[in-house]
Image: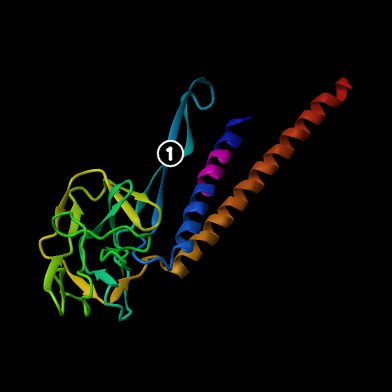
Amino acid sequence: MDNNTAIALSSLVVKQRAMDIVAGNLANMSTPGYRAERPVFADWLQSEANTSSPRGERTLAFVQDRATWRDRAEGTLTHTGNPLDLALSGNGYFSVQTPAGVRLTRAGRFTLQANGTIADESGNPLLDVTGQKLTVPAGDTNLTIAGDGTLSTRESGQIGKIGVVAPKDLNRMTAEGSRLFRADVATAPVATPKLVQGAVEDSNVAPIAELTRMLTVQREFEFTTQYVEAEGSRHQTAIDKIAAPLA
């Protein structure tokens, strides 16, 4: 395989990765609290020594998939009227207790479990400011959640406060699925959280922009594929012409 084809194939690999990321974003455009994923590609340089044209050393630039990052722009709020649908305006994440440990989320669609705990759609209990599970006393009704996270009921009054935290380094978070994040550094309580009861934060994926990205990546993939195929045909033609006198 010559260098031109190898470079083109490296480009095809990252374009396939870009297509997978865009497809994942589109699949989660209705997932509450979802953060769009973006790829980071870069040149991978390889030096060729002892080349005669051009004189001296020549550098080949391949394409490599370096990383992905999450767009932290806030999604719009949709008001549902459900008292346990919660949205965060501004900085911070809810904490939930999962079988793998504490995880962070912006997906604030919670429900009241039979045992009195408040849990997310996967059954992971919501945690309070002390890191404990929030529990609503049996028989309590009319849950009210203030903007600072204070949880109250008509019968018992104030029963707890929802914890809203933020990692000390927002770049040290690892996505687990479409709703949860694992903080790889310590977290700290948000001083002035802003909760909105009866609403959920939508995904921050912009469908039209994402479809435009998909079409762009698809066209680039097709053009590069055509180039690789043309190079393959050119090589085969050259081989056939060289081998013909020997037949």
Is 12 placed left or right of 70 in the picture? right
Structural crowding at the residue carrying mark 1, measured as other residues with C-alpha within 10 Å and reported as few (<14), some (14–19) or many (≥20): few
Q: Nearer the viewer, residue 186 or 242?
A: 186
Question: Which residue lies at the image location 47% right of the left edge and 70% below the top edge?
Answer: 208
Q: Position of residue 233 (x, y in %)?
A: 74, 39
Decide whether the magenta segment is chiefly helix, strand or loop: helix
Q: Which residue is drawn at the image coordinates 21% and 66% (left, top)?
A: 90
Judge from the rendering whether residue 223 lies leftward or rightward of residue 166; answer left or right.
Answer: right
Q: Position of residue 157 (x, y in %)?
A: 11, 75
| Residue lying furthest front | 138
Q: Is residue 92 part of the magenta span, yes or no?
A: no
* Rendered view: 169 above or below 56: below
Quadrant of the image for the N terminus?
Answer: top right
- In the rendered image, the residue lying farthest to the right is 247
Left or right of 9, for residue 193: left
Image mark count: 1
In the image, the segment drawn in magenta is: 8-15
Mark 1: which amino acid? Asp
In the picture, residue 235 is in which quadrant? top right
- In x, y percent, where is residue 102? 26, 50
Find out whether residue 10 is within the magenta segment: yes
Residue drawn 24% across the image and 51% down it? 170
Query: Of helix, strand and loop, which one carries label 1?
Result: strand
Residue at the spot x=55%, y=37% of the render? 7
Compared to residue 24, the image places residue 171 above or below, namely above
Residue at image mark 1: 43
Seen from the viewer's position, the closer of residues 147 and 134 is: 134
Name which quarter of the figure residue 207 lies in. Answer: bottom left
Between residues 132 and 28, which one lies in front from this camera angle?
A: 132
